[in-house]
Image (cartoon, rainbow, N blue to C red):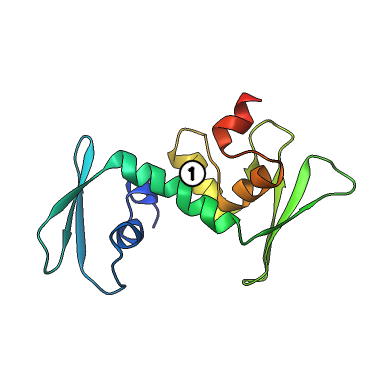
Amino acid sequence: MVTAFNLIYSVSAIRRLLGLAVGVSIRIQKFFYVIWVHVAGRRPTFISKSAFKAHFVEHRKAAAKALTVTKSVFQGHIYSVRNESKGTAYQINIGSGQPICSCDDFNNQIQFLNGLACCKHAYAVLGHLGYGSLREYLAR
């Protein structure tokens, strides 16, 4: 179950940040500016919340590079984003200012991140349009 805490500060993110294999036991606890991380067999460490947030964005941007973006012929503000390896596709609507996607990641971000969201599908569209970040796109 996705929560406001584990959306960004997830065990999966810790595995990627620390280069850990699946199956290693990890415990985490939130503090004001950092996340305490204990990996079985290692000394506990702290990872800054800002490092998690940067990873959250960069992980989605990296995943977006493998997606195929196609602009709708009939509606200029609608894009189709296809993941060829999974055989999935999502529609991204950029007509309202912020890109809007129907994927679970986008919906979780909207719910838990104060209404501002950008999933890998939205990053694929933003990259296709020549933007390097959601902030840059929103500032246009």
Q: Nearer the viewer, residue 50 or 114?
A: 50
Secondary structure found at label 1: helix
Residue 86 x, y percent position in the rendering: 62, 71
Residue 53 x, y percent position in the rendering: 38, 42
Residue 63 occupies which quadrant of the picture? bottom right
Q: In this view, does 40 lie to the left or right of 95?
A: left
Is 116 placed above or below 121 here?
above
Type of the residue with mark 1: Gln
Determine if residue 9 is in view: yes
Quarter of the image containing the C terminus? Answer: top right
Residue 90 occupies which quadrant of the picture? bottom right
Q: Please name the residue shown 74% across and 34% down the image.
A: 95
Q: Badge 1 is on which residue?
A: 109
Q: Please name the residue shown 40% across and 49% down the image.
A: 55
User: Residue pushed farthest bottom?
Assistant: 23
Is 84 placed above or below 9 here?
below
The crowding category of the residue bearing disc 1, from other C-alpha atoms within 10 Å (few below 14, some 14 to 19, many at least 20), is many
Quarter of the image containing the N terminus? Answer: bottom left
Q: Please name the residue shown 20% across and 69% down the image.
A: 25
Q: Nearer the viewer, residue 104 or 26?
A: 26
Residue 12 x, y percent position in the rendering: 35, 61
Residue 67 x, y percent position in the rendering: 65, 60
Q: In this view, does 40 lie to the left or right of 11?
A: left
User: Residue pushed farthest top?
Assistant: 139
